[in-house]
Image: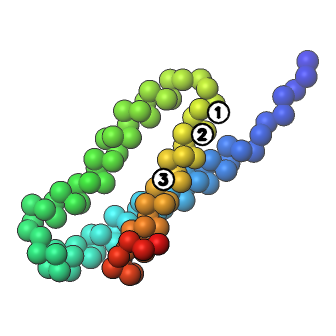
């Protein structure tokens, strides 16, 4: 009986997921610290700030539905490709957000 060689690609996925989770945590932390200044500079009331703060919860809800569906599928390549694609989208979104906060425009 031949022993199948395990790939170490799963640790790459774990590293990517850790990186994205750390960015998400940093975003939430910075937003909670900068919330009062943000509300003052954009003339937002407490209801609008509540919508902004709850956007992180909405992303969890929206991710749970397809996440549960894809976890029932036993296609490893599909799951890996989807997680890498979503990671790239999130990192690109954070890049655009940071660039906008530094420059004040969307010229990347």
Name above or below for residue 1 compared with residue 20. Answer: above
Circle 3 Cα neighbour tier, 10 Å, few/some/many (<14 / 14–19 / ≥20): few
Where does label 2 land, which residue? 81
Q: Quick one: quadrant of the N terminus?
A: top right
Name the residue at the front extreme: 107
SS for callout 1 = helix
Is residue 36 among the parts visible in the rendering? no
Q: Which mark is residue 89?
A: 3
Q: Which mark is residue 77?
A: 1
Whole-angstrom CA distance, mark 3 to mark 1, is: 18 Å
SS for callout 2 = helix
Name the residue at the top extreme: 1
Name above or below for residue 51 compared with residue 8. Answer: below
| Quadrant hosting residue 6 | top right
Is residue 41 among the parts visible in the rendering? yes
SS for callout 3 = helix
């Amino acid at each position: 009986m031949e022993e199948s060689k395990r790939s170490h690609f799963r640790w790459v996925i774990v590293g990517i997921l850790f990186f994205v989770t750390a960015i998400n945590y940093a975003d939430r932390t910075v937003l909670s610290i900068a919330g009062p200044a943000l509300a003052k500079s954009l003339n937002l009331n407490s209801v609008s700030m509540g919508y902004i703060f709850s956007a992180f919860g909405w992303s969890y809800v929206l991710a749970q539905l397809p996440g549960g569906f894809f976890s029932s599928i036993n296609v490893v390549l599909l799951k890996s490709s989807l997680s890498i694609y979503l990671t790239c989208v999130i990192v690109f979104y954070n890049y655009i957000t940071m660039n906008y906060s530094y420059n004040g425009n969307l010229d990347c």
